[in-house]
Amino acid sequence: VYIAPYLNSPNFSLEVLLTTEEEHKQPNKKPRGRWGRAWHTEERKLLTVTDSYRFEPAATVLTLLPDTLPELFTTADLAQAINRPRTIAQKMSYTLFHSGLISREGKRGRAFLYGRR
């Protein structure tokens, strides 16, 4: 979500690496607070870089939106189309909206309707 202001810049390109990593977790001795985590990540090791995608210009990230997505869509529609949790779709929509790549076209109930520019 912090990358939003840069996605529309003509001199900015984005390279995304898909990686395989190993994560070592340790149990927490004493979880703090009401929602204290039982485990914490002790160490992460990069094993391999499996693939690389370059978006140049960065605005070509719109190609990640599926063709089956309706012209006006909500984050629930996006989550269903990409087969990911709604929280991921909300982060995608937030980033694309604040970078100016999609626009808010109205509301359906309490949900924003987004459209491609």
Image (cartoon, rainbow, N blue to C red):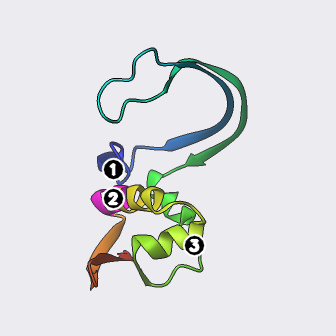
Q: Quadrant of residue 44?
A: top right
Q: What is the secondary structure assignment of the residue under circle 1?
A: helix
| Residue that appears at 56% across and 61% down | 84
The image shows residue 19 at horizontal and vertical percentages of 67, 34
Question: Who comes first in sequence, dot 2 or dot 1?
Answer: 1
**In the image, 92: left or right of 9?**
right
The quarter of the rendered structure image containing the C terminus is: bottom left
Q: Which residue is under mark 1?
A: 4
Q: Which residue is under mark 3?
A: 81
Q: Please, is residue 56 above or below residue 26 in the view?
A: below
| Residue that appears at 53% across and 19% down | 27
Q: Which residue is under mark 2?
A: 94
Q: Main secondary structure of the magenta part?
A: helix
Q: Nearer the viewer, residue 19 or 33?
A: 33
**In the image, 39: left or right of 93?**
right
Q: Please, is residue 4 above or below residue 17 in the view?
A: below
Label ID, residue 23: none
What span is colored magenta in the figure? 95-100
Distance between the alpha carbons at the discs numbered 1 and 3:
22 Å
The three-letter code of the residue at mark 2 reads Tyr
**In the image, 108: left or right of 116?**
left
Q: Is residue 99 magenta?
A: yes
The image shows residue 96 at horizontal and vertical percentages of 37, 60
The image shows residue 26 at horizontal and vertical percentages of 56, 17
Q: Are marks 2 and 3 in contact (CB under 8 Å)?
A: no
The three-letter code of the residue at mark 1 reads Ala
Q: Residues within 10 Å of mark 2 (few under 14, many from 20)?
A: some
